[in-house]
Amino acid sequence: MTAPPTMNTAAWTDDEFVARRAEIEQRLARVTELEHKLAQQNATYTSPTSQQQTTSTPATKAAPPAKKPRGAPKPFDPSKYTTRLIALKFAYLGSNYNGYEHHANNTTPLPTIEEELWRALKKTRLILPTPKPGLKEDDINWEGCEYSKCGRTDRGVSAFGQVIGIRVRSNRPKPKPKKKLKLEDGTAAAQEGSNDAMEGVEGAAGAPKEAEEEYEEPAFDDVKDEMPYCRVLNNVLPPDIRILAWCPNPGESFSARFNCKERRYKYFFTNPAFAPSPGASGVYKSGERSMREGWLDIAAMREAAGYLEGLHDFRNLCKVDPAKQITNFERRIFHTSIDRWNGGSGFAKYARNPQFQIPGLEAEDRQAIVVGGGDGNEDENGPGLFTFNVHGSAFLWHQVRHLVAVLFLVGQGLEKPTIVKELLDVQKNPTKPKYEMATDTPLVLWDCVFPAIQDGHPEHSQPDAMNWIYVGDERAFKGPRGNGMEEKFGHGGVIPDLWEVWHKRRIDEVLAGSLLDLVAAQGPQDGSGDGPVEKKGKGMR
């Protein structure tokens, strides 16, 4: 059979194209007319009254068949499924939430992370909570789920490595009874072994005893055959809450709270911390050196942060909750540092101008104070974004925000770095001084560490030993490689979802920063006046 000849339209004129189009439209109209007539004939022949109609009676258009009503959804039977204890690692941006923890009978203006997580687990029927007297179907109920949480972040605080333990529904089939073979006389025998195997065994002869039914475990891979927990939950969670990984074998008695031996926080801040004023009006005296409002002495802050490391009593660096009646305020800090974040990119450029700088600083001093050292690279010098990093075994209520507040006082020159030592000496300073803690939004629970050794309280930081299956991990897929990349970067994946969240906020940041630079460049900028007016700031009281 030969292929139909191809039509060469390269040399056609406009009139030939128009004529060809008219011919095609005419044929299509004829086909449509024939299809309509055929549908009318079929409706006439299949109509229950068609036998009573004469041939002279015109056929009427049959009514469309009524849709079959959708039946009620089948009730979910938890007994048909197996469950398993897993760990989930997830991230969230906390600005739209009233903190992590849900409190019963306490309605908050914003939802909590825990409430959103519970709704997602319940909607996907991953958790099978035991009914609790006095609770409605929609009330938060973790009964029977072996639920545990690692950290309880406050309102506005974010987390990029929060961890929970939870017992969830599994794809693992339930054990099945072993098949029995039928003998010629109609009796049943176990598939493995026979009566001959009992020969010579005392008590084998005589009246038959009721044997316990044996079960066999179907073949099942703990990861490849398991439900895609991350994808299932991410499909129903808000876009600013994302499940990042799950651990298939955290341990039979795993507790996200007690098995976590180290929590790592980052607090983001800018330098200058707030808008500096040009000229002498923005200068104040800090010891023997002049400081400009807004700028922070990074080197002094690093010195103060170093005093926090070790085992200390932090009652003067936290918020005491009278309801909990805590008597032990000792906590161990493994590591502290203050680092420039991502080269300080995206910061308002106008603050680089000389009239907004700290007066009287040489290049080397400026590099040490403003940036905290370095090679003097132009991109690393001047205003930018920094992080205060702190790793510890556990933290008290609002402890990190209190630490940052004291470091800010040191950075502005309002307190000396040794103030940290004095606050940690509870014998010398048994009463907490008055000072305002830092704001909540820049704080992030960066990671939670679960080391292999769980005994006691470690004195040093240890590596995480959890077997995390991250989104896109090829270990979770059967067949050829590449499915993980699609789940992570493809349509509906984690990266596109987070890109949308980042893109909107990044545009907002760029617009606000551009407006700031534009207004700063308009009108007077040098702040020149009659003379320097120095003012002295206030520290703790």
Image: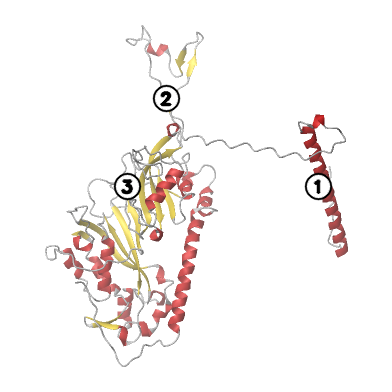
> In the image, what residue occupies the spot 51% across and 49% down?
484
As drawn, 497 above or below 132: below
Amino acid residing under circle 3: Ala
Q: Determine the image quadrant of residue 39.
A: top right
As drawn, 275 above or below 404: below
Q: In the image as oriented, which residue stretches furthest toward the bottom?
A: 530
In three-dimensional space, the C-alpha distance between marks 2 and 3, rounded to whole angstroms, equals: 33 Å
Q: Which label lies toward us, 2 or 3?
A: 3
Tag 3 secondary structure: loop
Which of the two residues, 513 or 382, is positioned nearer the viewer here? 513
Q: Which mark is residue 215?
A: 2
> In the image, what residue occupies the spot 34% across and 59% down?
155
Q: Where's residue 344, x and y in %?
A: 40, 71
As drawn, 210 above or below 254: above
Which of the two residues, 265 or 515, is positioned nearer the viewer here? 515
Amino acid residing under circle 1: Thr
Q: Which mark is residue 256?
A: 3
Which of the two residues, 341 or 362, is positioned nearer the viewer here? 341
> In the image, what residue occupies the spot 25% across and 73% down?
410
> In the image, what residue occupies the spot 41% across and 49% down?
117
Identify the mark nearer the N-term, 2 or 1.
Answer: 1
| Res. 3 in view | no
User: Mark 2 packing: few (<14 Cα in 10 Å), some, or many (20+)?
Assistant: few
Query: Which residue is the site of mark 1?
Result: 32
Tag 2 secondary structure: strand
- Say which quadrant the C terminus sits in: bottom left
User: Mark 1 packing: few (<14 Cα in 10 Å), some, or many (20+)?
Assistant: few
